Amino acid sequence: MKQFAISVPVTELSYDELSPEELELVNTAREASHRAYAPYSKFHVGAAVRLDNGVVVPGSNQENAAFPSGTCAERSACYYAGARYPEAKFEAIAVAARGTDGMELDEPAAPCGACRQALVEYEHLAGHDVPVYMAGATKVYRMPSVASLLPFTFSEF
Ligand code: THU
């Protein structure tokens, strides 16, 4: 028998430790949370994808009366980025959320499992690690890649 552990390096940053480019990405996700359509959960999520063509694509969760028909912020951002700029490679991703009280969460927001699977496809297409920024009210977690959030990733690549 053999056992091994998989560890994930997390970098915790305060907002003033972010580079201007990182701050732009994270703030785009935070702003996008204000455009969420979340009348059912009242949980407002924003996401942003930085592409190698210089464009930062925002997304937000869009809910539906038939609950499963809605989509998460991360998937609205990555699918729009893929649909609008099919040739562009992903460079970085950010996610931010506001709770039912409208306030940003203290603990940084993490992408759900389905979004991790969706995002890792674009990381594979990029051909390199794509860092993920998870924004909280006063701190940001930087993960080195989407795959680091999804060990034993299922992939056709
Ligand atoms: N949601 C996201 O937008 N991203 C996630 O990673 C997790 C959850 C949305 C889906 C739904 O509109 C609301 O948050 C409550 O689950």
Image (cartoon, rainbow, N blue to C red):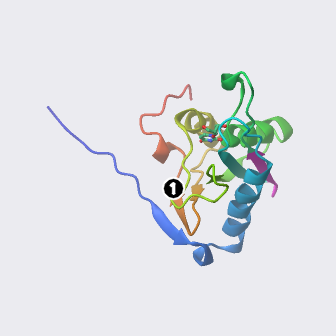
Q: Can you say which quadrant of the picture contains the N terminus?
A: top left
The correct choice, above or below, for 121 with respect to 133 in the image is above
> Residue shown at 56%/69% (left/top)?
138
The correct choice, above or below, for 63 with respect to 16 in the image is above
Residue 111 spot, x, y in % from top left: 57, 44
Residue 30 visible in this rendered orientation of the protein = yes
The correct choice, above or below, for 1 with respect to 128 in the image is above
Hey, which residue is sitting farthest bottom in the picture?
16
How packed is label 1: few (under 14 Cα within 10 Å), some, or many (20 or more)?
some
Residue 98 spot, x, y in % from top left: 64, 53
Q: Can you say which quadrant of the picture contains the C terminus?
A: top right
> Residue shown at 57%/58% (left/top)?
105
Magenta residue span:
53-59
> Residue shown at 78%/42% (left/top)?
81
- Which quadrant of the frame does ligand 1 lie within? top right
Of 126 and 141, nearer the camera is: 141
Of 89 and 140, nearer the camera is: 140
Hey, which residue is sitting farthest front in the picture?
101
In screen coordinates, is 13 left or right of 79?
left
In screen coordinates, is 9 left or right of 2?
right
Residue 51 visible in this rendered orientation of the protein = no
Q: Which residue is mark 1?
A: 144
Assess whether residue 33 is covered by the magenta stretch. Answer: no
Three-letter code, disc 1: Pro
Residue 103 spot, x, y in % from top left: 64, 59
In screen coordinates, is 34 left or right of 136?
right
Numbered disc 1: secondary structure: loop
Of 117 and 122, nearer the camera is: 117
Q: Exactly how many numbered labels are in the figure? A: 1
